[in-house]
Amino acid sequence: MANPLRRPTTREVAALAGVSVATVSYVLNGKVERVGEQTRRRVLAAAEELGYVRSSSARSLRLRRTERVCLVVGSIGVPAYDQLARDLSDAADAAGHGVLTMVVDSPARADKAVDLLRQHVADGAIIAPSVPYLSPAQLRALADLPLVVMSNAADPDGFDVVRTTEDAACAEALDHLVATGRRRIAFLGHRHELTGELPTERHAAYLAALDRHGLDRRPELVVDGADDRVAAYRSVTALLAGPVRPDAVFAASDRAAISAILALRDAGVAIPDEVAVVGVGNLDEGRITRPPLTTVGPPAMDFHDAARLLFERVLATGERPAGRVITTEWTFIRRGSA
Amino acid sequence: MANPLRRPTTREVAALAGVSVATVSYVLNGKVERVGEQTRRRVLAAAEELGYVRSSSARSLRLRRTERVCLVVGSIGVPAYDQLARDLSDAADAAGHGVLTMVVDSPARADKAVDLLRQHVADGAIIAPSVPYLSPAQLRALADLPLVVMSNAADPDGFDVVRTTEDAACAEALDHLVATGRRRIAFLGHRHELTGELPTERHAAYLAALDRHGLDRRPELVVDGADDRVAAYRSVTALLAGPVRPDAVFAASDRAAISAILALRDAGVAIPDEVAVVGVGNLDEGRITRPPLTTVGPPAMDFHDAARLLFERVLATGERPAGRVITTEWTFIRRGSA
DNA sequence: CTGTTAGCGCATTCAA
DNA sequence: TTGAATGCGCTAACAG
């Protein structure tokens, strides 16, 4: 198969430098106290000359750790993940670790990701929010690995959990819609929310709010679009031409909510007078829409806590910490669109 | 450091099944012809009972390959990368490989990525388009590894290159702007384009077009925003209030161009009559703006070719293929905004 | 059909 | 301060 490209080994470096492999290892790992300055320089020169690069497999095998962590996301192209990746990378840099990202966008990929993680491709992992397709059983299968799960659906079980109060915040947003007279509230969901296989909070919050206020559940008002700006735009446009004209749109993502605003404006619908719009996520982008987007989310995108939890686990030397829970406060953020 | 979680090994599985480690290996690797059905089942049962998972380090060390490939991107949150990740994952699935993604969003991260790649964390890699911070020298340092570089700035040198004709397409777009009477064309660039450290085609195409048509280069018309929708919106808004009011905006990304359209509309500026807008990338999202976005890009997002090149290299058994070049046709796509 | 054995490249103990 | 020897867990050649 793969061209097994031969790379120089410590043995060859040792030979060239006229020392033993042990000495090479000491030099390469900065055990300065164990080797003389002369030797050190000779080894470094030899390594340089041969273009030596250490083998991560051999090193990980010997060390029983990879010095890498993994970020598991549901898709690339989600703005919030960007910040998560940055915050995790910062923490990883500080710990001298690398960061690998895995994209899980189908059940098959979830299996593959779990396999790789169990095979110890990294020393720990953060499961980003809203990675569907990863079942509780799969999470449990990973519990040997230092793990931080960002989900409200998970309970700590050998791993840490980072939660949000989005449930309550969504409820508050929906209550607000009803309190301001909205009766035909549309829901713009993620694809996996609409198939009904995977339960999700935002859809559940929507249904609960309807029930709580005695409003009818109208299936024709529940449409697709939260993962895809174009789909969201089209869904809302279609809604306006449909049999039940909504007087509010509750979108499961800010991206979808922003598309909804564009669609409504293009259709000449007044926001929020005729149709109110609420998103979820508190993207910065919501500040530049007209009207500015009313949403539900954290006050600021900040994932340092999650990263910290992960590295506390990854670097833990003795007993593993018990499963911890951190809760990030989400609130209803009222701007102009509702 | 890391809790070196002890996992069962083939040896233990072998002991429990009452066979040798070789037999376990045969069973686990599907060498059906080498082992009897009875034994096979016993081994599988033992592995199951112990919760055996193979060690990727040990396996990679022995095999001299990881059965993983790497996707190197400049940031998460770029819509085009989404499709690239999908196309690469499809090819990887077919080859039984895993996909790891690395985010390179600073020179330091570029170094780290190059290190990991050289340490053979994967059997090959695709460098996505517009990953700045990766120097030609670093690319050369990686040339031992099967590599596909998506860049117009690179020449094949032990690796394959996937190019686009965006140069010509940008030129055509800019010529069109000038031909339709635009004289004060603003440029909305990526941050790394504006610092001047890293040359980029789109900025170069912009400057070349100005020169070609004898238009003044006006530094105040060159602004930031191509990486960030909010920044783009603000840049354009600021431009409208500035000393030199543009009559066209050439944005280095469609995301920025879309923000430009929003900003112009919010300011009551007619598009394209008063100000024309052109983006780069041909995102689907450009179809839902008002007016629809005029852009430069490929007819469709499709990265199968790049993925194919990579796996041809990764799976190549004999001689490595010489560096190949594939060129993707980009065109000027005229819709409503210019 | 199954077992024995020799490394893959590296870090580390123990002697010198 | 340095070197020789050992083994991390796995696969594959060879022997039986």
Image (cartoon, coloured by chain):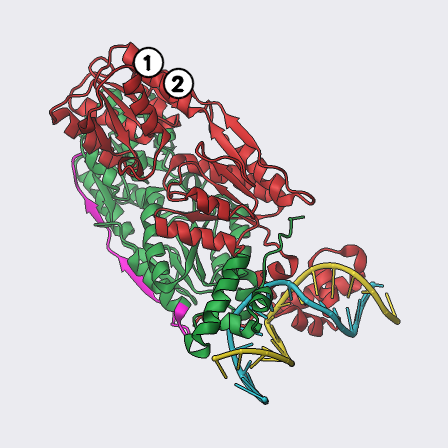
Chain colours: A green, B red, C cyan, D yellow
Res. B53 image quadrant = bottom right
Q: Is residue B251 above or below residue D12?
A: above
Q: Where are the magenta residues, as a range? A: A315-338
Question: What amino acid type should be assigned to the residue bearing mark 1?
Answer: His
Residue B99 in the image: state x and y as whole percent. Answer: 52, 47
Badge 1 density bin: few <14, some 14–19, many ≥20, Cα 10 Å:
some
Q: Which mark is residue B103?
A: none
Residue B200 in the image: state x and y as whole percent. Answer: 35, 33
Residue at x-position 64% and y-position 44% = B315
Q: Which residue is mark 1?
A: B176
The span from disc 1 to disc 2 (Cα, nearest Å) is: 9 Å
- Does A34 sit left or right of A115 as displayed? left
**Viewport quadrant of the C terminus of chain B:** top left
Badge 2 density bin: few <14, some 14–19, many ≥20, Cα 10 Å:
many
Residue B126 in the image: state x and y as whole percent. Answer: 50, 42
State whether residue B295 appears in this view. yes
Q: Secondary structure at mark 2?
A: strand
Q: Secondary structure at mark 1?
A: helix
Prevailing secondary structure of the magenta residues: loop
Residue at x-position 41% and y-position 25% = B166
Q: Which mark is residue B332?
A: 2
The reply to whether the magenta stretch includes residue A211 is: no
Q: Is residue A67 above or below residue A301?
A: below
Question: What amino acid type should be assigned to the residue bearing mark 2?
Answer: Phe
The reply to whether the magenta stretch includes residue A320 is: yes
Res. A246 image quadrant = top left
**Protein chain holding label 2:** B
- Same chain for marks 1 and 2? yes
